[in-house]
Amino acid sequence: MKWFDFINARLGFSNRHRRVLDKPVPAGINYLTCFGGITFTLFVMQVLTGLLLSLYYTPSDADAYRSIQRLQQEVPLGRLLRSVHHWSANLMVVTIVLHMLRVFVAGAYKNPRELNWVAGSLLLVLTLGFGFTGYLLPWDQKAYWATVVGTNMLGSVPLIGPALASVLRGGMDVTGQTLLRFYSMHILWLPLFTAFFLWIHFHVIRRLGVAGGM
């Protein structure tokens, strides 16, 4: 592509990133080792579709549900966009669990990759956090009562449970303040933490290479 050659000749993209992108693949790699890459691809899809959905979503108790209905009924390809976001999230949970099972069975969490296992475990927690916070955003009856049950379960944790539930809800009950907090976590705090732990994860893989085995 001429436009890329023009920019590359002046900024040197290919030379600058060659040492990062060019990496020989070790022997013994099979389809089971691809679950991590599939999970990351699904995460990228989540980011892209989430950015588009945020253009039409209104995070308020008065307008959240109506904005979802408007997205699905009036916005061109809106229903498809939301469906891709929804199913990518479900598949992301499945693939990250399969990825961690493969790593565990293959013993790829052992020295010197312990930090990579910790980062991956935290990414699993963050992925579940995305699912939990995103579930409330449609602000329908199913989402509301599922959040009530989920936060009540958190509140049953000894000593710190009630305080955690109160912070998460923004009060004693699930209200519009809860919706706003969940939306903030879903589009801001969780992505920031995810980007940080992804950087650690990829840095270790880049430094030590892909673990072989199953």
Image: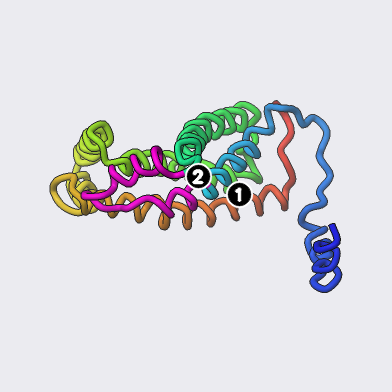
Residue 65 on the magenta segment: yes
Q: What crowding class fits label 2: few (fewer than 14 Cα within 10 Å), some (14-19), or many (20 or more)?
A: many
Residue 140 appearing in the image: yes
Horizontal placement of 1 versus 67: left or right? right
What range of the chain is rendered magenta?
49-75
Task: Single out the residue that lies furthest toward the bottom.
Answer: 10
Q: Is residue 122 above or below residue 13?
A: above
Residue 34 figure quarter: top right
Q: What crowding class fits label 1: few (fewer than 14 Cα within 10 Å), some (14-19), or many (20 or more)?
A: some
Element carrying mark 1: helix
Q: Position of residue 104 (x, y in %)?
A: 58, 30
Horizontal placement of 96 versus 126: left or right? right
- Residue type at tag 1: His
Residue 91 on the magenta segment: no
Tag 1 near tag 2, CB within 8 Å: yes
Q: Which residue is mark 1?
A: 201
Q: Which mark is residue 123?
A: 2
Q: Quadrant of the N terminus?
A: bottom right
Q: Position of residue 102 (x, y in %)?
A: 61, 28
Horizontal placement of 76 versus 32: left or right? left
Q: Is residue 18 above or below residue 118?
A: below
